[in-house]
Amino acid sequence: LRLWLDPYSIKLHRIWWEAMYDPEQELPLSASMAFSRFMSGSAVRHDGPISKGSLRLLLVASNPEGLRRLQLEDINLSVEKSIVTHATESLGETLVVEKYMPNVTVEGLAQKQAAEGFQLVHILAHTIIRGERSFMVLADGSGNAQEVECQQVVSALTPADALPHLVFLAAPMVAEASTGPALVTMSPWLVDAGVRAAIAIQGPISEDRLVNFCNSFYETLITTGVIDVALMVARSAIF
């Protein structure tokens, strides 16, 4: 099922479409069929599918000093990092993971993506919504927490000559459930900027469910190369 949405309709994207329920199966539709939001992007890509060599994933985890000042909890990096590491370690040389943490700056993120051209980017960070504006909490030059406009983060991740194929946006397990919509808002902006697909976990979920989701998603993605199918399998693993 493909749901076509305006990339910049914030209210439409903040609706949890994936939770539409099939009363006969007692499951969300997205757990029993390939269910994705689609939109047209304004950027033009000139690269083709990845056909050879290892995939490279940048694991970004932002845990700067002073989160409590923003009424946010410190992220348990060892646990969060282990979830993605465990999900990808069985893939061997097929998927090479590089880590960027804990003092992630928007400038550093831009430099890494422009220089290295990672095909996959997995971001773990707190987000904040203020009215219609959304922010990601990254570090400043001194390692202290600061609010960065999500649109700035999108620009950092999408240099014209090094666009990622997939960006995975995750809220930390200690985040408030209300922070997820900021990540959902970022997803269409990423696609509009030229990213082929963006995934956003709209709210924190338990460690065991997140492990199951990531394991199923990355394994199926590498096996099939089809993001829609990988998402369906991952959702089915946690329902």
Image (cartoon, grey):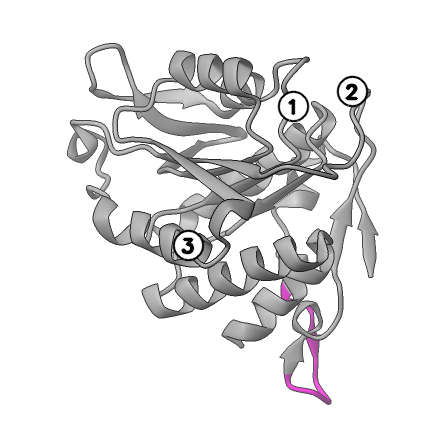
Majority secondary structure in the magenta region: loop
Question: What is the C-alpha distance between the residues marked 1 and 2?
Answer: 10 Å
Q: Which of marks 1 and 3 is in front?
A: 3
Residue depicted at 83% across the width and 33% down the height: 40
Q: Is mark 3 on a helix, strand or loop?
A: helix
Asked whether, in this view, residue 105 is left or right of residue 52, the answer is: left
Q: Where is residue 30 in the image (x, y as percent from the top left)?
A: 68, 67
Question: What is the C-alpha distance between the residues marked 1 and 3?
Answer: 24 Å
Using the image, tell me which numbered label, if any, was put on residue 43: 2
Asked whether, in this view, residue 148 is left or right of residue 193, the answer is: left
Question: What is the C-alpha distance between the residues marked 2 and 3?
Answer: 33 Å
Establish if 218 lies above or below 23: above
* Amino acid at circle 3: Glu
Residue range corresponding to the magenta coloring: 19-26
Quadrant of the drawing holding the C terminus: bottom right
Establish if 34 lies above or below 237: above
Q: Where is residue 231 in the image (x, y as percent from the top left)?
A: 64, 60
Residue depicted at 37% across the width and 51% down the height: 85
* Amino acid at circle 1: Leu
Tell which of 214 and 7 is nearer to you. 214
Q: Mark 3 points at which residue?
A: 89
Image quadrant assignment for residue 205: bottom left
Q: Position of residue 3 (x, y in %)?
A: 81, 52
Q: Name the residue under label 1.
A: 163
Q: Is mark 2 on a helix, strand or loop?
A: loop
Q: How crowded is mark 1: few (under 14 residues within 10 Å), some or many (20 or more)?
A: many
Q: Can residue 181 be seen in this view?
A: no
